[in-house]
C-alpha cells in the first residue's frame, strides 16, 4: 500500500492480517490497471486474521458491491492461494450514513466457490444475515417445556402470553413480552418453553436465549477484541431474541446502549423480543428511560408466588417425573412449608430423595420433616453482590452509588475493595462479573482489591474483627 495515502479508518490493524493482505495485493496488483488498483484496493484496510478468516474493511456498501461484482473471482482465487482452500474473506463495511452505529460488519463469503457471486446491497445487517443462515446454538434447554410447566393462578397470564408468543413470534401485539417476578418462580422455564415451542412449530429459525449477564460480559469482550460490529450483528440477525434477567443491565450504560439499538433493529423488522426481570420494567433502577419505555410497548406479565394448590400440583408433577411414589401427607407437608419459591420446592424433593436412598429409608412425614428443617436453613438464597455492596456501604458509611463510580477517594476505595473481597469470598461470581458490578472495572482491579484486603487482614486485628462482623451480618440477612 502507498503509505502516503491516509488510511480511511484509523483503526489498529493486526500485523498478521496486514501481512496477509499485502501478500494478496502483491498478487492482485499486476493483474489490474494501476488506476483500478489505486481506486479499489488501496483504500481497503485489513482488520484481523483469525483461524484462516481474514476480515477487511471497505469504506461503503457501494464499494463492497463493486468489489463483489468486478473482482470477486480475482479476490477469491487470491485469498485461496494465500490462505489455502479453507481461507475465507469477510468484509466489514463503513456505513456511517446508514445506521446509528458507525459501522456494521457484513461478512461476505468470497473464498469458497459455492457462495453466490453477489450479495444484495440492502442495509448491511441484511447482507450479514445472508451469511448467517446456518443453524445457531440457541442455548435453549429442551427440558423446559409448556408440558411440564404447571398452570396456576399465579402464572396464568405469563404462561398464556408466552404460549401466544411461542405460537406466533413477532405476530402478536405482545412485543416485547416482558415477564417479571421473584426468583425461582418460573421465568426462565417459561422463556425456554416459549423458544422451544416456536422452534418446534417452525415459527422461528434463529432463536437465541441469553442472560443479560452473559450479554454484558460478551459485549465487554467484543469491545476489547474490537468485534463490536460482529457482536451486534449476531443479535440483530435473530427472529426471536430472549434475554433473561434484564435487571443486570443496571448501571451498564454502554451495554444498554448497544442493547437499545439491537432492540430497535429487531423491533422495526417485526422480530420477537422476550425479556424477563425481577421487578416490573418501570421499577428497574439504573436503566435508561428510553429502554424502559421500549420495554413497556408490548405486554408486561407477572408471575406471583404459587398458591398452595399450585405448589401441590408442581410437587406431584416432579414426583411423577422422578418416578417417585410420594405419600400425599409428605407432599402436603412440603407444599405448606416451602411457600415462596419453586426452586426450593424442587430442592426439597431432591434432598428427600437423596436422604431416602442413601439411608435406605422409606419416605415418611418424619423423614420429610427432618429434611425440611435442614433444607429451609440451607436454601436461603445466596448473598448477591449488590447485597454485599449495600451492607458494606452502610457499615463503612460511604454512599452506595460511589462503589460503582469512578471516585478514588480513599474511604470509597477502601469500601470498594472490601466489597470486592467479600463478593469473591461469598458469591460464585467470576472476577469479571464482580468487576462489572463495580462500574465495569477490570478483573485485575478485583484481584488487586482482594490482595490488598488479604494483606491488611494479616496485619490488622481490628480490621479482621470488622470483616468478621460484616460476614456475620451477611449470613443473617433476611
Ligand atoms: P426464575 O427464572 O423465575 O428464577 P426458574 O424458571 O429458574 O425461575 O424456575 C425454578 C425452577 O422451578 C425450575 O426448575 C423450573 O422448572 C421450576 N418451575 C417454576 N415454575 C414452575 C411451574 N409452574 N411448573 C413446573 N415447574 C416450575
Ligand atoms: Mg431465571
Image: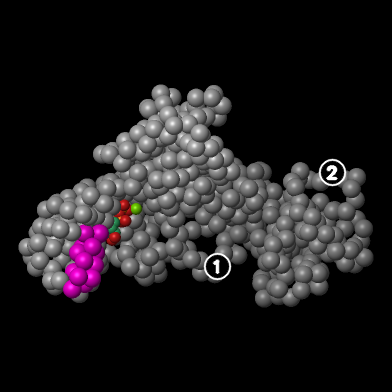
- N-term-proximal mark, 1 vs 2: 2
Closest to the observer, 40 or 83: 83
User: Where is 67 relative to 278, above or below?
Assistant: below
Horizontal and vertical percent position of residue 469: 35, 34
**Residue 351 on the magenta segment:** yes
Horizontal relation, residue 432 to residue 474: left or right: right
Residue closest to the eye, 311 or 103 = 311
| Magenta-colored span | 347-360
CA gap, disc 1 and disc 2: 37 Å
Is the stretch drawn in magenta largely helix, strand or loop?
helix
How many dots with numbers?
2
Q: Quadrant of the C terminus?
A: top left
Q: Which residue is mark 1?
A: 133
Residue drawn at (37%, 27%) of the image: 394
* Residue 6, disc: 2
Residue sitting at 31 percent across and 41 percent down? 475
* Above/below status of 68 relative to 451: below
Q: Where is residue 257? Give x, y as percent.
A: 52, 40
The residue drawn where x is 59% and y is 43% is 444
Q: Is residue 301 magenta?
A: no
Q: Residue 389's image quarter?
A: top left
Rendered image: mark on residue 226: none
Check disc 2: other Cα within 10 Å, few if <14, some if 14-19, many if 20+.
few
Looking at this view, is 184 or 205 the one in front? Answer: 184
| Residue 418 visible in the current orientation | yes
Amino acid at each position: 500500500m502507498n503509505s502516503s495515502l491516509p488510511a480511511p479508518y484509523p483503526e489498529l490493524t493486526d500485523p498478521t492480517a496486514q501481512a496477509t493482505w499485502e501478500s494478496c495485493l502483491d498478487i492482485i496488483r499486476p493483474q489490474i490497471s494501476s488506476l483500478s488498483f489505486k481506486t479499489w484496493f488501496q483504500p481497503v484496510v485489513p482488520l484481523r486474521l483469525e483461524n484462516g478468516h481474514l476480515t477487511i474493511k471497505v469504506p461503503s456498501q457501494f464499494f463492497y458491491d463493486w468489489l463483489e461484482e468486478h473482482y470477486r473471482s480475482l479476490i477469491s482465487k487470491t485469498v485461496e492461494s494465500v490462505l489455502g482452500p479453507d481461507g475465507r474473506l469477510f468484509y466489514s463495511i463503513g456505513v456511517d450514513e446508514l445506521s446509528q452505529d458507525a459501522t456494521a460488519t457484513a461478512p461476505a463469503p468470497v473464498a469458497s466457490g459455492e457462495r453466490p457471486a453477489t450479495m444484495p446491497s440492502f442495509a448491511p445487517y441484511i447482507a450479514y444475515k445472508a451469511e448467517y443462515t446456518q443453524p445457531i446454538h440457541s442455548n435453549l434447554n429442551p427440558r423446559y417445556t409448556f408440558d411440564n410447566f404447571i398452570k396456576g393462578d399465579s402464572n396464568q397470564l405469563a404462561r398464556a402470553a408466552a404460549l401466544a408468543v411461542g405460537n406466533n413470534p413477532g405476530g402478536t401485539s405482545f412485543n416485547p413480552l416482558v415477564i417479571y417476578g421473584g426468583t425461582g418462580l418460573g421465568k426462565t422455564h417459561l422463556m425456554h418453553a416459549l423458544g422451544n415451542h416456536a422452534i418446534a412449530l417452525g415459527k422461528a429459525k434463529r432463536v437465541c436465549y441469553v442472560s443479560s449477564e452473559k450479554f454484558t460480559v460478551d459485549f465487554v469482550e467484543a469491545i476489547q477484541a474490537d468485534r463490536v460490529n460482529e457482536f451486534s450483528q449476531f443479535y440483530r440477525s435473530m427472529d426471536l431474541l430472549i434475554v433473561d434477567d434484564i435487571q443486570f443491565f443496571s448501571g451498564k450504560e454502554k451495554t444498554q446502549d448497544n442493547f437499545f439499538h439491537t432492540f430497535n433493529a429487531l423491533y422495526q423488522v417485526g422480530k420477537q423480543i422476550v425479556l424477563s426481570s425481577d421487578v416490573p420494567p418501570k421499577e428497574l433502577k439504573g436503566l435508561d428511560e428510553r429502554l424502559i419505555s421500549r420495554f413497556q410497548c408490548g405486554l408486561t406479565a407477572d408471575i406471583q408466588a404459587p398458591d398452595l394448590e399450585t405448589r401441590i400440583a408442581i410437587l406431584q408433577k416432579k414426583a411423577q417425573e422422578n418416578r417417585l411414589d410420594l405419600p400425599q401427607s409428605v407432599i402436603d407437608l412440603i407444599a405448606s412449608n416451602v411457600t415462596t419459591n419453586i426452586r426450593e420446592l424442587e430442592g426439597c424433593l431432591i434432598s428427600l430423595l437423596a436422604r431416602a436412598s442413601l439411608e435406605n429409608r422409606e419416605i415418611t412425614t418424619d423423614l420429610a420433616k427432618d429434611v425440611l428443617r435442614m433444607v429451609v436453613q440451607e436454601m436461603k438464597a445466596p448473598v448477591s453482590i449488590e447485597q454485599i455492596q449495600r451492607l458494606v456501604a452502610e457499615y463503612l458509611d460511604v454512599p452506595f452509588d460511589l462503589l460503582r463510580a469512578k471516585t478514588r477517594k480513599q474511604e470509597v476505595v477502601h469500601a470498594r475493595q472490601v466489597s470486592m473481597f467479600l463478593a469473591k469470598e461469598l458469591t460464585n461470581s467470576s472476577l469479571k462479573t464482580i468487576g462489572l458490578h463495580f462500574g465495569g472495572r477490570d478483573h485485575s482491579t478485583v484481584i488487586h482489591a482482594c490482595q490488598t484486603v488479604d494483606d491488611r487482614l494479616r496485619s490488622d486485628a481490628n480490621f479482621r474483627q470488622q470483616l468478621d462482623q460484616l460476614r456475620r451480618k451477611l449470613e443473617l440477612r433476611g
